[in-house]
Image (cartoon, rainbow, N blue to C red):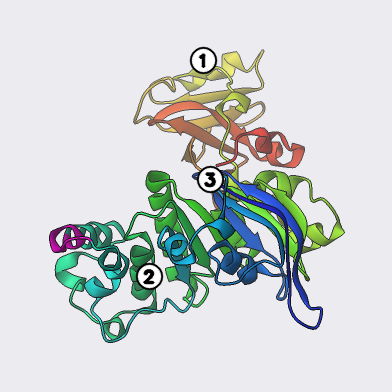
Amino acid sequence: MIRLESVRKEYPGGLVAVDDLSFEVPSGEVCVLVGPSGCGKTTILRMINRLIEPTSGKILVDDEDILRVDPVELRRRIGYVIQQVGLFPHQTVAANVATVPRLLGWDRARVKARVDELLTLVGLPTGEYAQRYPAELSGGQRQRVGVARALAADPPIMLMDEPFGAIDPITRTQLQDEFLRLQQTLRKTIVFVTHDIDEAVKMGDHIAILRVGGHLAQYDPPDRLLAAPANDFVADFVGRDRALKRLRITHIDLVTLHTPPTVSDVRAARAALETNPLVVIDGSGGESNGGSIAVLTRGAEAPVAVPTVAHDRPLQDALALMLERHSAWVAVTEDGRYRGLLGIDDFWSGSATDGHTS
């Protein structure tokens, strides 16, 4: 857990970088700091690991005031990843990753085992990458080494300053996905800086939107922030497409699906339409794998096949399928079994976004 209590950073001449800042990052969660240039994002990170001392206020890590902790000892408990990576160019990938464990006095066998484990974890197999030098790697590969180095001593806390900011969009998306996968397993407490609200929404369990001068404009989970901006500044910053952004982080809710009668032949379906406006038809009654799923509506000459989407996918995927296939419906499956329908009208009415965020 990281807690900031009324933290202020003022430089000589009266320049205030951070002003009366208070928020808490729960253990095992990702807090993303986002805001315009000059809002104090990097200053906050550097105060947490005491590269910069706050002018006033408190910063606590697991209820311990960091100003009472030896700075070197504190930094060895905190992984730090920056946009420029900062790898030692004259050292191999393995030697870079081993930096902190060696400083901590780990024996050679333990260091090697940790390096092998981490390079595999970030998708850089030891046999292929351990003896390479940073200049022999792509930008994305160097960022992966930077993450591995930050994780080397298994720190409970990680600070990440625009770690994917200088990479092409495709590689950036891949690294974001890879890091989220790692976080599901590692459950580190992370403070992550970005200038990109889309990245903040994707990566954060909580988002702190900051104004110039280090004023906190809003601190909330992504879904709440997008659904209810605290003021005009936040609304403008997250953008007019905030409803679409919510679709990226909101999963389909099985409870809200339409569950019309399920039959296995068109004749029975037409009979059912006398009392029901909508019937789903598939090759096995909609109860098992393998059957195609179609919808028959009143007045239609024949059932119309509909696309399918897994229940654990974000609503954005469901809407994209409907638009791509020109379909008013998408069939939702769980472990390959049909569970119900999601309709295009559900997005306009807002009922689709009553589900759970990821």
Q: Are marks 3 and 2 in contact (CB under 8 Å)?
A: no
Q: Position of residue 28 (x, y in %)?
A: 49, 45
Q: Could you say which disc has been placed on residue 62 in the image?
A: 3
Mark 2 neighbour class, 10 Å CA radius: few under 14, some 14 to 19, many 20 or more: many
Q: Could you say which disc has been placed on residue 146 in the image?
A: 2
What residue lies at 71% left-to-right and 44% top-to-bottom? 224
Q: Amino acid at mark 2?
A: Gly
The numbered mark, 1 or 3, whose residue comes first in the sequence reads 3
What residue lies at 51% left-to-right and 15% top-to-bottom? 268
Would residue 195 be seen by someone viewing this image from the given angle? no
**In terms of image quadrants, where is residue 137?**
bottom left
Query: Principal SS element in the magenta part?
Result: helix
Q: Bounds of the magenta span?
A: 106-112
The front one of 226 and 319 is 226
Q: Is residue 128 magenta?
A: no
Q: Are marks 2 and 1 in contact (CB under 8 Å)?
A: no
Nearer to us of marks 3 and 2 is 3
Q: Could you say which disc has been placed on residue 268 in the image?
A: 1
